[in-house]
Amino acid sequence: MTKNFIFSFKQVVPILFPYLFYLFIGIAFGVLMDTAGYSVGWSFLSGVFIYAGSMQIVMVSLLVAGSSLGTITMMTFFVNARHIFYGIAFIDRFRSMGWKYPYMIVTLTDEVYSILCNVKYPNDVDIKKVDFKITLICHLVWILSCVAGAMFGKLLPFDLTGIEFSATAFFVTVCINHWHTMASHIPAITGLISALLGFFVLGPNQFILPALSLTVVVLIGFIPLKH
């Protein structure tokens, strides 16, 4: 193993293994896909091409409910809209990476973004190679966890009833973490108010997309005023 790979792996370990949260979400997705009747191949392809923990979990519920492709597309856009801003922050840094540039942009998840924002590069490593290896390791671990959940979920020695609640638990955890780590609570409060407004006006079956749309519009409108 090269020095670049060893250094990259050390940066990834603190994200992947404490509490096994990253792995658990992937395994939970695989189990949900298997329970919904989708083969291991679909879990593998989802891990490779979608690579979005929150959206993949939500996607299973949408597929089971028979949601249209348009609804799934719009939901994917809103749930992953934050990745647009991640990409903007790193666009100059990734552009010099040649053929790896598109891959780096597409696979810039919450975890990868967090690592790349905080990593301290020693002088004896290649920064571009380290960035690529960090991204690739996270992606491969995610694919492996999705496939493992689909293949071996039924063999787990405990009752998996209620595992679909993992999506709700995941978003609650993200919200709480956002509340504690971000200086501004405006995004969280805007999302809560939009969700409540949409829920009581449009009902529980039609409020999600309008609520997400309202949240994005309000936050985009707020940013220019703040500056």
Image (cartoon, rainbow, N blue to C red):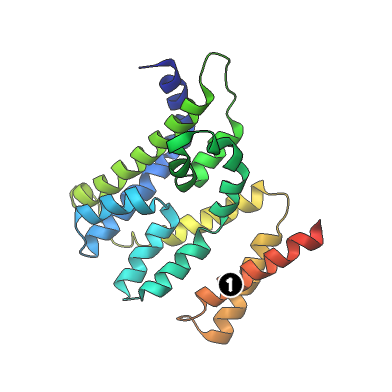
Q: Amino acid at mark 1?
A: Ser
**Above or below: residue 18 compared with residue 29:** above
Residue 213 is situated, as x and y percent measured from the top left of the image, at 58, 72
In the shown orientation, is residue 206 left or right of residue 50? right
Q: Residue at x 36, y 70 (%)?
A: 62
Residue 183 is situated, as x and y percent measured from the top left of the image, at 73, 49
Check disc 1: other Cα within 10 Å, few if <14, some if 14-19, many if 20+.
Answer: some
Q: Toward the viewer: 111 or 16?
A: 111
Q: Residue at x 44, y 56 (%)?
A: 54
| Residue behind mark 1 | 213
**Above or below: residue 17 compared with residue 120:** below
Q: Toward the viewer: 158 or 167?
A: 167
In the shown orientation, is residue 48 left or right of residue 71? left
Q: Residue at x 36, y 76 (%)?
A: 68
- For the C terminus, the image quarter is bottom right
Q: Toward the viewer: 90 or 165?
A: 90
Residue 165 is situated, as x and y percent measured from the top left of the image, at 39, 62
Q: Can the viewer see residue 18?
A: no
**Above or below: residue 87 compared with residue 222:** above
- For the N terminus, the image quarter is top left
